[in-house]
Image: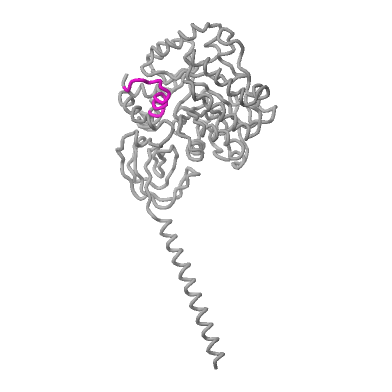
Amino acid sequence: MDKKRKLLFVIIFLVVVLVLIYLFIVRNKEENKKEDIQTNYLKATVLSVSNDSITVKDGSNLIYTFDSVNDFDLTPGETVVLEYTGVLDKNVQNQNISIVSYTVDSTPLETKLSDNGIFSKFYKMAEMKLDTMSLDEKIGQILLVRVPDKNKINDLQKYQFGGYLLFKRDFESKTRSEVVSMIKEFQDNSKIPLLIAVDEEGGSVVRVSSNPNLASAPFKSSQELYKEGGFDLIKKDTVNKSNLLQGLGINVNLAPVVDVATDPSSYIYDRTIGLDTEKTSEFAKTVIEASKNSKVSYTLKHFPGYGDNIDTHTNQAIDERPYETLLSDSLPPFEAGIEAGAEAILVSHNIVKSIDSENPATLSANIHNLLRNKLNFTGVIITDDLSMQAISEYAESPVVKAILAGNDLLIVTDYEQSINDIKNALNDGDLEEEMLDDMVLRILAWKYYKGMIIDNIK
């Protein structure tokens, strides 16, 4: 009888334990379910609205698309606080979660863009300057224009560009005093100080030092420098380069090339340091740190890493590398440069299939999300030249798509067409003036950061 009682007791005990385990599991499932449907909030700028979706950009320039919002009366450019259920996935643009409601936000622009980033101390001053600008001046400010053959001064006065990009032809045969006078004339005819940019990489790309009147010899490539004196010589070369450019009035160098390329047959190889990811990362860090004592800003390029792809000036390069390879091989040099204080990054026209199989990187929101979110970059994102053949078939108006993708500064050659495209998009409701405002604010904050703008109001 005792044995039967003991057996019964054991059975009852096991049943109780199983019931408790079951109840624990059910309770956890209910709590997890509640967490999955908890309400959250997202403050963002509306990029586009259709009958079945809305696309927005948050304060970190991450872009999200939500479905089933046909009842929402929103227009592009408005800042809204979205109430939603579920959890945002920052690694993708399209979100599989529901929006419950929204409110239009009227917070000041400099607060909306407050990202505690590299230029954040200057957002308030930038917003004060922004408030004095016309729409036409805002459009001009987001353009980095290849210096035209004709009407350099008249069109600068008319359109008030954010900057001029100079090429070899602009320096050819000129003396130092002639170049200084040319750039001074540009600055004297701009209401807001101009970004004066060049590609002075060294080696095969030397816009300035190719002129013997300006430099005793062309700057050497990063590969030559490294072979001759390692990173110490690269540091010294960066200082010498900065001194030359600064003395001429140039304040932006579209260099260094921090693409990782180790195959001598690849298109970009000769312009890179030609070393592995670790050494290329050290190269990026060395150049950015060495540039910080000058008034010349350096630009990491070509994000997210050119690799061994073809030339995108005339062809479309498609990057087939797996995402994990990009993370481990191509992104670290950009991360190293950002940590060293990089102020600007230039994006390539390559199609990186593992991130966005449909759009060139310059026009891809996913690429810009990666740069802002994964690498936490808060500086100015610059497009490669939007007149390149590589992107012509992907957008009727590349400048508009480049704005929607998350760029801040657009390199253009046909600036009149670009301005018309932006104005048409504004008139059609595809863009709103508020979209330009956060681009212009970051550009102005950069100019304050560099000491280019002295007065708040000019």
Against 456, residue 339 (above or below) is below
Instruction: Answer with the quarter of the image where residue 430 lies.
Output: top left
Residue drawn where x is 63% and y is 28% of the image: 310
Name the image colouring: one colour
In the displayed orientation, state which residue is furthest to the front: 232
Whole-percent x, y for residue 300 in the image: 54, 28
View extreme (bottom): residue? 1
- The quarter of the picture where the C terminus appears is top left
What x and y, as percent, mark residue 103?
A: 31, 44
Look at 50% across and 32% down and name the residue there. 363
What residue appears at the point 38 percent right and 45 percent down from the top-left corner? 42
The part of the chain drawn in magenta is 441-456
Does the stretch in magenta take in 439?
Answer: no
Whether residue 310 is situated above or below residue 67 in the rendered picture: above
Q: Give the answer, above or below, for where 204 lies relative to 34.
A: above
Q: Nearer the viewer, residue 88 or 202?
A: 202
Quarter placement of the N terminus: bottom right
The percent position of residue 62, horizontal first and vertical second, equals 45, 39
Find residue 271 and report its horizontal and vertical position in percent. Answer: 62, 24
**Nearer-the-camera pick, 242 or 211:** 242
User: Residue 238 sits in which quadrant?
Assistant: top right
Within the magenta stretch, is there residue 444? yes
Residue 355, quarter of the rendered image: top right
Q: Is residue 195 left or right of residue 133?
A: right
